[in-house]
Amino acid sequence: MEFTFKNIENNRLIFKKFLEELTVEQLNTIPEGFNNNIFWNIAHAMITSQLLCYKLSGLPFTIDAAWVMSYKKGTKPEKDITDADVKELKELLFATLEQLKQDYSAGKFNAFEPYTVSTNNSTLNSVDDALEFNEYHEGMHLGYILAQKKLV
């Protein structure tokens, strides 16, 4: 899984760059034709690993559940974010990944509830499947962000 973890880290470095280069106003803007903004896409990509790896393994989230509830599938931005939110998300991008790597290495993901993802109708049967799908999912949201960046 070293390659998968490295790709997730690379995605998150790109996400961090967007958070550093764009203004809070740009991060809050929902371009015409979209249901969400750049900040939402980054936060959603980050929390999805919590749902796929921890929840499906019957483990507690490693972040405040408010993040998960605000950015899970089916949500949309409900309020403008602040500089403090941007700072926290930049930290969470890497803190959650490091914790995930540690928990994976420690063998904490023993149980796993199979889950069929709506994105491509694939069934995840293990945490390894979840991590590989998460890598794909983050890349998909990177594509949305690149499209939105041209419009903000």
Image (spheres, rainbow, N blue to C red):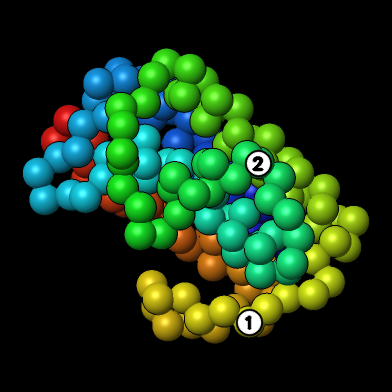
The residue positioned 31% from the left and 39% from the top of the image is 78
Which numbered marker is on residue 55?
none
Q: Quadrant of the N terminus?
A: bottom right
Looking at numbered disc 1 in the image, what kind of residue is underneath it? Answer: Pro
Q: Residues within 10 Å of mark 2 (few under 14, many from 20)?
A: few
Q: Position of residue 106 (x, y in %)?
A: 90, 56
User: Considering depth in this image, is 43 or 142 the residue closer to the camera?
Assistant: 43
Which type of secondary structure does the marked residue at label 2 adopt? loop
Q: Position of residue 93 (x, y in %)?
A: 58, 37
Residue identifier under label 1: 114
The single residue placed furthest to the right in the displayed view is 106
Real-space Cα distance between discs 2 and 1? Answer: 23 Å
Residue identifier under label 2: 63
Looking at numbered disc 2 in the image, what kind of residue is underneath it? Answer: Ile
Q: Say if mark 2 contacts mark 1, CB within 8 Å.
A: no
Q: Is residue 87 visible?
A: yes
The residue positioned 40% from the left and 76% from the top of the image is 118
The residue positioned 45% from the left and 54% from the top of the image is 72
Drawn side of residue 38 relative to residue 33, left or right: right
- The answer to whether residue 29 is above or below residue 132 is above
Q: Is residue 7 visible?
A: no
User: Considering depth in this image, is 71 or 139 the residue closer to the camera?
Assistant: 71
Q: Residues within 10 Å of mark 1 (few under 14, many from 20)?
A: some
Q: Quadrant of the C terminus?
A: top left
Earlier residue among tags 2 and 1? 2
Location of residue 132 (image quadrant): bottom right
The residue positioned 54% from the left and 67% from the top of the image is 133
Location of residue 64 (image quadrant): top right
Q: Nearer the observer, disc 2 or disc 1?
A: 2
